[in-house]
Amino acid sequence: MGRTERCLSARRTSPALRRPDVMRLETPPGMRIFGSPHRYVQGPDAIDALGGLIKAYGATPLIVIDQFLVSVLQDRLAYTMLSAGLTPMLLPFGGEITYAAIDALVARTNGSALSVVVGVGGGKALDAAKSVAVQLALPMVTVPTIASNDSPTSAAIAMYDAHHVMIAVDRMPRSPDLVVVDTRVIANAPTHFLRAGIGDAIAKKFEAHGCRNGTGNTPFGSRPLMTAIAIADACYATLRDHAAAALLAVTAGILTDDVEATIEAVILMSGLGFENGGLSIAHSLTRGLVVARGAKVAMHGNQIAYGTLVQLAAEDRSAPFIADVMAFLQSIDLPIRLAELGMANATDTEIDDIARLTMTAPHLANVAWPVTQADIGRAIHRIEQLATAQTFTPVSGVV
Ligand SMILES: [Zn+2]
């Protein structure tokens, strides 16, 4: 959890809108806490079952949907809602997640009596729906249409200003009530989204172990649980076994068991792994990468894949261990050097800048030793050198 993270209900919602069961639980000292969505549903054409899945919440769902998906999904959504006897309100959303944009979305509900908020789309649509759900004190359902990160299972909401600069990571007082993952929809999305999601998920094993080895806490304010360590381990093992075949299948437009396993790792295991296991150096590095020349436009998951390598180097892992992870990343076309993130010929000054900004990340408090800017800079240089020696050839066809 970042220093800037906070509970929306305490800051943004008027007392009249608060509901006791959605208020954030204070973390009692010394308690171990596990948080997760109430239910997770995954499979081909899951969207067509959505009406029945949310019927128990009431008859008037609010659907916040990515505006580019309205023409693609509105007929299917209307059919499943009507079949379940529901009368939904549909709110298309586009643009940035700002407090003003969320207030405008809430205003468009016009005080209607709504039963549940459903977010349909990529990260922005889901975060918009999460914010609206908090403001209206309603249960929340995520329906991701891409698997580029683990936000569908998490309580986190990335907030931005009007200039697209992230200003805070707010948190819902509860995890999403329901996560509905239509694997056919996700498999039909451009392959680079799933590849980025894999990059985001690969880090979780190393970050959870790193957090547990230190004195760090999870976003729930708890020491990492053994359950989360097991999930993060399973996430990494699943990706090592299935990710390459899954990317080949998705590129060919085929939905296979490898794709199902990979999506489960990217959305469910990765989300549970970080919220209950904690974050570490890999995610801290994004503080520098999001403003670095070229690298700043790389997808979050691609930045995290590289950040994972830097964490391994900072932890002083052996060259063969790092080479093995590098070979895996290369095999699925994830970056192993700054140039592959878009930052060719990085100078010492630029690497120092990345290291300096990395030091501003709250997750660094989770590291087992007092990590310094010099440690991070050395780790980046070590990865750049090891990547030069790496000769693995990517699997043909994974592009
Ligand atoms: Zn992430």
Image (spheres, helix red, strand yellow):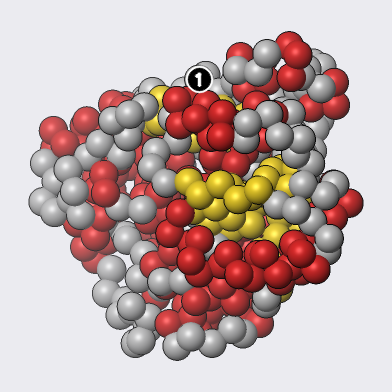
Instruction: Tell me if residue 280 can be seen.
Output: yes
- Of residue 277 and residue 5, the one placed in the foreground of this image is 5
Q: Is residue 93 above or below residue 33?
A: below
Q: Is residue 217 above or below residue 274?
A: above
Residue ID at (55%, 52%): 65
Horizontal side of 352 relative to 262 (left or right) equals left
Mark 1 residue element: loop
Q: Quadrant of residue 331?
A: bottom left
Q: Quadrant of residue 324?
A: bottom left
Where does residue 51 sit, x and y in percent of width and height? 77, 62
Residue matched to label 1: 4
Horizontal side of 199 relative to 296 (left or right) equals right
| Residue situated furthest top in the rendering | 15
Where does residue 279 sit, x and y in percent of width and height? 56, 38
Where does residue 244 sit, x and y in percent of width and height? 49, 78
Label 1 crowd (10 A; few <14 / some 14-19 / many >=20): few
Please, what is the three-letter code of the amino acid marked with disc 1?
Thr
Residue ID at (45%, 25%): 100
Instruction: Tell me if residue 211 can be seen.
Output: no
Residue ID at (67%, 35%): 133
- Of residue 189 and residue 219, the one placed in the foreground of this image is 189
- Of residue 380 and residue 102, the one placed in the foreground of this image is 102
Q: How many marks?
A: 1
Quadrant where the C terminus sits is bottom left
Quadrant where the N terminus sits is top right
Q: Is residue 8 above or below residue 288?
A: above
